[in-house]
């Protein structure tokens, strides 16, 4: 421990104070603070608190402690000085968003196809994260000490539909637990609408097949041996057969892996319409569609996949939330053309 520095309790930091009760003696400093912070309704994860401790922002009886494993003793007075959240990188951009629900903790939005979620190589700006930073402004309390939205699940650039985003550390922790559980023991529902090539031979089914990077094409995902892949389960049910070539199916995720629905449906012999990666071998089937349906498929220009249902328990209020999204215009027009041709 070092003598306390005046900067610890500077005017720009918010200070949280805690006292160690006799029954809590011996606990690690980071665990004690995480439990007390959560009980006080503060938005501080254990990871964030560990960083604050190591950064010299925590004092015990007026002396700075920089070891997260420090064992607290009964009667000690603890203070945590939380610096203001750092400004976000990247910068916010005024991009229109379709917000379905928003409160101080989180928001639910309907992402359009073509919008990249995270900045990255080739997409340094114009992303959903840029748009959220601009939309939320000062309502972002800081995920890990930075004013940024907490993304706990993603949609591919060319997949449309519902997403939930955290605005506070507390909501981010709760949503992360929820999505890591994949609906096994916690309430979570994610269902997608997909248009697939072929005629499913049964009303419903599931694919239980681990996914990992393709052994040759590193840009692709493939079904791989369990030892080198991640567990992945997709439940599907037939919604409508649109003639002999195309069907609409609902896919419910029990896990959420990259390209999961696209790979799993292709493994059954029913790849998604418009999928440029996993449906290449089915492009000639488009010639069997009506001229109207062919034109609508060309206009779609992407995989026919839409996240239409999202249901979960609010990680802070406990309220049951469920949202539905109608397919966007390009998918709706393709569906109508397929119905007419069928």
Image (spheres, grey):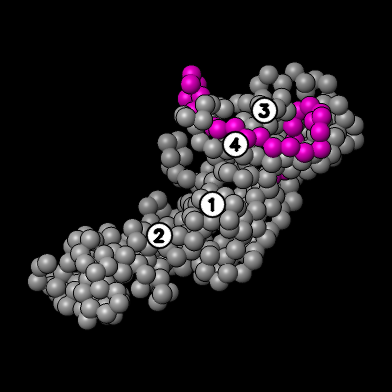
Left or right for 338, reference 271: right
Which residue is tagged 3? 266
Q: Earlier in the sequence, mark 3 or mark 2?
A: 2
Q: Residues within 10 Å of mark 2 (few under 14, many from 20)?
A: many
Look at the image and say whether residue 204 sits in the magenta stretch: yes
Q: What stretch is highlighted in magenta?
A: 192-220
Residue 101 falls in image quadrant: bottom right
Marks 4 and 1: which is nearer the front? Answer: 1
The residue indicated by pointer 1 is 181
Identity of the residue drawn at 59% across and 52% down: 184
Which quarter of the rendering shows the C terminus?
A: top right
The answer to whether marks 4 and 1 mark residues whose Cβ atoms lie closer than 8 Å is no
Residue 155 against residue 66 in the figure, above or below:
above
Q: How far apart are marks 4 and 2 (CA)?
A: 27 Å
Q: Residues within 10 Å of mark 4 (few under 14, many from 20)?
A: many
State the residue position of label 4.
260
Is residue 311 visible in the rendered structure shown here?
yes
Say whether residue 57 is magenta.
no
Residue ID for mark 2: 143
Q: How crowded is mark 3: few (under 14 residues within 10 Å), some or many (20 or more)?
A: some
Q: Do the residues labelled 3 and 4 touch (CB within 8 Å)?
A: no
Q: Helix, strand, or loop for circle 2?
A: loop
Specify the label residue 310 is tagged with: none
Q: Visible in this render: residue 98? A: no
Among the 4 quarters of the image, the one containing residue 234: top right
Q: What element carries label 3?
A: helix
- Image-based side of 84 in relation to 272, left or right: left
Q: Are marks 1 and 2 in contact (CB under 8 Å)?
A: no
* Image coords of residue 328 (percent x, y): 72, 46
């Amino acid at each position: 421990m070092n003598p306390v520095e005046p900067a610890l309790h500077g005017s720009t930091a918010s200070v949280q104070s805690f006292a160690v009760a006799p029954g809590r003696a011996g606990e690690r400093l980071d665990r004690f603070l995480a439990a007390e912070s959560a009980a006080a309704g503060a938005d501080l994860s254990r990871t964030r608190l560990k960083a604050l401790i190591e950064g010299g922002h925590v004092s015990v009886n007026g002396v700075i402690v920089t070891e997260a494993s420090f064992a607290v003793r009964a009667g000690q007075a603890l203070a945590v000085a939380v610096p203001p959240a750092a400004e976000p990188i990247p910068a916010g951009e005024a991009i229109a968003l379709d917000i379905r629900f928003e409160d101080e903790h989180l928001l639910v939005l309907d992402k359009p196809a073509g919008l990249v979620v995270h900045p990255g190589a080739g997409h340094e700006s114009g992303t959903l994260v840029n748009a959220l930073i601009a939309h939320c402004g000062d309502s972002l309390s800081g995920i890990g000490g930075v004013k940024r939205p907490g993304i706990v699940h993603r949609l591919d650039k060319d997949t449309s539909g519902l997403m939930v985003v955290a605005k506070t550390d507390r909501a981010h922790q709760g949503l992360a637990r929820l999505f890591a559980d994949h609906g096994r023991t916690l309430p979570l529902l994610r269902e997608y609408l997909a248009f697939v090539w072929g005629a499913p031979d049964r009303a419903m089914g599931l694919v239980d097949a681990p996914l990992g990077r393709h052994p040759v094409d590193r840009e692709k995902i493939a079904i791989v041996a369990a030892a080198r892949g991640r567990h992945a389960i997709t439940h599907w049910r037939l919604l409508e057969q649109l003639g002999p070539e195309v069907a609409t199916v609902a896919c419910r995720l029990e896990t959420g892996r990259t390209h999961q629905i696209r790979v799993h449906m292709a493994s059954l012999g029913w790849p998604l319409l418009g999928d440029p990666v996993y449906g290449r071998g089915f492009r000639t089937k488009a010639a069997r569609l009506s001229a109207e349906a062919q034109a609508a498929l060309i206009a779609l220009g992407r995989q026919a996949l839409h996240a239409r249902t999202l249901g979960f328990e609010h990680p802070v209020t406990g309220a049951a939330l469920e949202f539905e999204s109608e397919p966007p215009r390009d998918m709706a027009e393709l569906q109508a053309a397929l119905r007419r041709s069928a």
